[in-house]
Amino acid sequence: MSYNRSANLANEDTPERENARAIRARQRAIGRELRRMYDSVAQEGIPSEFLDLLKKIDETSAKKGP
Amino acid sequence: MRPDTHTTQTGRSETPDDFRSELLALIPFLRAFARSLCGNPETADDLAQETLVKAWQSRDTFIPGTNLKAWLFTILRNQFYSDRRRAWRQAPWDQESAERIPGTREDQTWAAELSDTARALRCLSDEQREALILVGAGGFSYEDAAAICHCAVGTVKSRVARARRALINILDGNDSLGGVERPAEGDAAKEIMSQLDALMPAQKSDHKKEG
């Protein structure tokens, strides 16, 4: 089982390797948090001001013609 | 050909409706990138809206079939830096505003509601922050991120690596949170120089008046 295997490896590891692994784990956690922050804005949906703005753009380009 | 079909510079045609619907679909990502650059949600949405207008105005320069998202992010990033240069020029320089840098009180109140990682992100240099967000959160390749940031691929790679190390240092309390930013290693001198550059025009004009 992968859980046991990684536990055994951890026991054999030098402090340096453990430290490097800990840093990688931290970086993965930070990466997840960054994606969560970014996605949480992206998933908010489109605020009405943006739709109003697009409507204005449509009206302006309709006036100018093709 | 439909009357509303326009031909782009490359000779390929794309209806304004196609471009418009793709633009609409990418608004959420524009907002997310803007938020990560500006921090403040209101400023970020203003920036994303400016980008939308700019993108529509320059739609004829977009080459169909290329990465529209990267094209939009490039416009947004350029707009962010040009807005900020303008803000620097317009801001009167005095001790009070010096003490408020980098954020206004409004920004700080808002920052208090952020997660530790989000606050730590504000302490990075702009260059490190944008590289990390594009690659680490936006899912861009190093190549696309380099194109968006107008720099070499290797530069993006080293900025992302330094940003990751700096974030861990800040989160571990080895670096100040919420203070004036203290970028890691080689960026420090560059950062100070860019801050000096921003101050110089005001000082030069003062000298002229005296002389």
Image (cartoon, coloured by chain):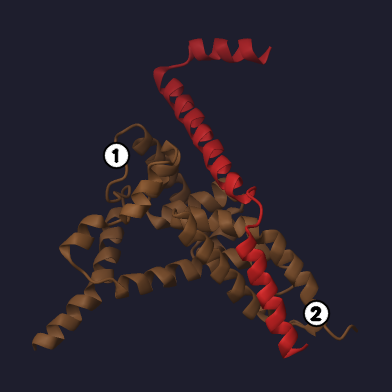
**Mark 1 residue element:** loop
Residue B21 point in image, percent of width and height: 76, 66
Q: Residues within 10 Å of mark 1 (few under 14, many from 20)?
A: some
| Callouts 2 and 1 in the same chain | yes
Is B190 above or below relative to B53? above
Q: How many labels does the image show?
A: 2
Q: The brown chain is which one?
A: B
Extreme residue in the right direction: B1
Q: Residue B157 carries which label?
A: none
Mark 2 → mark 1, Cα distance in angstroms:
52 Å
Residue at coordinates 48% horizontally, 64% vertically from top-left? B151
Marks 1 and 2: in contact by CB < 8 Å?
A: no
* Residue pointed to by mark 2: B12
- Mark 2 is on which residue type? Arg
- At mark 2, the secondary structure is loop
The location of residue A7, given as percent across then percent down, is: 56, 11
In the shown orientation, is residue B72 left or right of residue B112? Answer: right
Residue type at mark 1 is Asp
Task: Please tell me which residue is depicted at 35% across the width and 71% down the height of the picture.
Answer: B87
Residue B100 vertical placement versus B184 (above, below): below
Which label sits on residue B175? 1
